[in-house]
Image (cartoon, coloured by chain):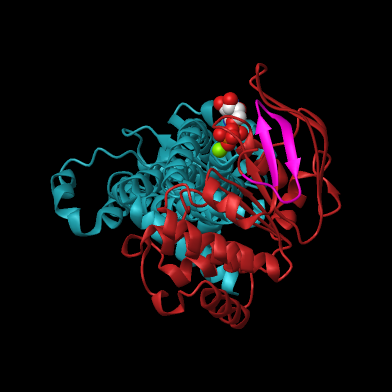
Chain colours: A red, B cyan
Amino acid sequence: MISFRNVSKVYNGNVKALDRVSLQIDKGEFVFIVGASGAGKSTLIKMMYREETPSSGQVFVLGKDLAKMRKREVPYLRRRIGVVFQDFKLLKDKNAWENVAFALEVTGTPRREVNRRVTQVLNMVGLLDRRNAFPNELSGGEQQRIAIARALVRNPDILLADEPSGNLDPETAMEIFAILERVNLYGTTVVVATHAHDIVDNLRKRVVELRDGAIVRDERRGAYHY
Amino acid sequence: MRLLGYIFSQTFRSIWRNKLSSFLSSLTTGFALFLLGISFLVSINLGFMYEMAETQMEIQAYMDKEATQTQLASAVSQIREIPGVAEVKFVSKEDALEELKEMFKDKASVLDSLEEDNPLPPSVRIKTAGAEHIPAVVEALQAFDIVDDVMYQEEVSRRLVQIGKAVQYLSLGGMLVVGLVSVMVIANSIRLTIDARRQEIGIMKLVGATDGFVMTPFLFEGVLLGFLGSAIGTGFAVWVYNWVAMKIAEFIPFMPIVGLDPDALWQMFGIMALTGVMVGLAGSAFSVRRHLRV
Ligand SMILES: Nc1ncnc2c1ncn2[C@@H]1O[C@H](COP(=O)(O)OP(=O)(O)O)[C@@H](O)[C@H]1O
Ligand SMILES: [Mg+2]
């Protein structure tokens, strides 16, 4: 599903963000990426949806060699990958429903299909009744759930989350991870970069730890620390 | 269909959001196209003048004002004998004054004072069998003592054509310069739109919108600004043209000016709109390449 082979990433010719990373993530896995700030977690995630390309090595996602992928193929890759960020990235002038529907509309999905999918996914994150609310009328946790709904509305094969609970209190963070776990149960591969060690320790999922861009630990049922 | 609706609503929203910049873009484009329009109108008139010069090659021989009736009559019969002459018409001083009055119509009263002391010379109007006879006939006419001055349409036309060409080159040159400026002004207007929608563009790309889909509203906006400019430019050019034509008709009545019939107007608007659309497309494509990184 996702495979890194000896991947290095150098920014601006001197900052080494990833250092010979090799990593295999199979279909249906739930993987935590942990590590200190600047360890390379975001860079690793960005390579998975081809926001960045490797300086050397190979990245395979959904059977495609991303380094060789042509630019006009990228949108079709992204339609099969949902991405969630720390800052939600919702559009302020659209309400909850419109923010989610937007992801389908910009790929020319028929209205009937949009209505069906958006209803379904808002229901899944428990915010169907808040569909007319604008982002500034929603709590941080609710905004993140809308962002997750948007990432899931196309029923992606992979869900990527870069510090999804970074701006949330522990209790709200727990809700978010509960949703991610549920998504994973339905068969979506989930990769989460996070600092939330309580949650990592509790969920007992696979943990990949980065330090200075290199993988220093990869445990089946790991914790945040050794 | 939904895609079209999306593009239209995005475009009108952002034109409205950047009212001033959009207006300036259209106005600059309008000015460039105004110059193109003027050049077009001048070229219509040039064509018309060439045609006139071809079909009405009339030579006018102005006679000595002091000449007697008999002298004039004998000159006219001699002129008829010149090889290549097809038609000869004598215009007396009185006839000439009548014609002048006819031209000025309602303002004829200003000519009343001319009645007592008519300064107009009698003349002879000659048509030749073909354009090739003109130089020889003109030369023969100039040999007459009684003939003061010889003018022929070709000469007049040639001067007018020269002036017309100069106007045309000037306006085309101006059009190129202002056209380039319009491309840049439109590019800037599109950049404002891109800046205002940067976050939205980022999300569109994140969720898998194609580059074409992301770009289209911006390109369409540029096209629309260019098209609006062409409407402004056509309107302005037609207005100025009609005004100038009116003034010319007032002061130089014999100068042929082409009236604008609907066909000519549509043809002109077609050319202007096409140019406007291309200018708009160039401007927005420039901005999209530069600021959208697609
Ligand atoms: N676009 C960029 N340009 C230059 N350096 C960058 C860029 N993105 C990240 N880096 C650097 O790469 C390293 C890894 O960053 P990042 O992947 O964001 O780490 P993390 O998400 O684990 O905090 C850091 O040293 C960071 O400063
Ligand atoms: Mg990061």
| Residue A80 placement (x, y as % from top left) | 72, 60
| Residue B71 placement (x, y as % from top left) | 42, 37
Residue B265 seen anywhere in this rendered image of the structure:
no
User: Which of the two residues, A35 or B266, is positioned nearer the viewer here?
Assistant: A35
Q: Is the magenta stretch mostly helix, strand or loop?
A: strand
Tally of marks? 0
| Residue B273 placement (x, y as % from top left) | 52, 55
User: Which of the two residues, B278 or B73, is positioned nearer the viewer here?
Assistant: B278
* Residue displayed at 39% across by 75% down: A130
Q: Is residue A81 above or below residue A121?
A: above
Ligand 1 falls in which quarter?
top right
Residue A12 appears left or right of B149: right
Image quarter in which the N terminus of chain A is found: bottom right
User: Which of the two residues, A178 or B37, is positioned nearer the viewer here?
Assistant: A178
Q: Give the range drawn in magenta.
A: A207-223
Q: Is residue B276 above or below residue A134?
A: above
Q: Which residue lies furthest to the front in this view?
A: A226
A29 magenta-colored = no
Q: Which quadrant would residue A120 be assigned to in this image?
A: bottom right
| Residue A91 placement (x, y as % from top left) | 43, 57
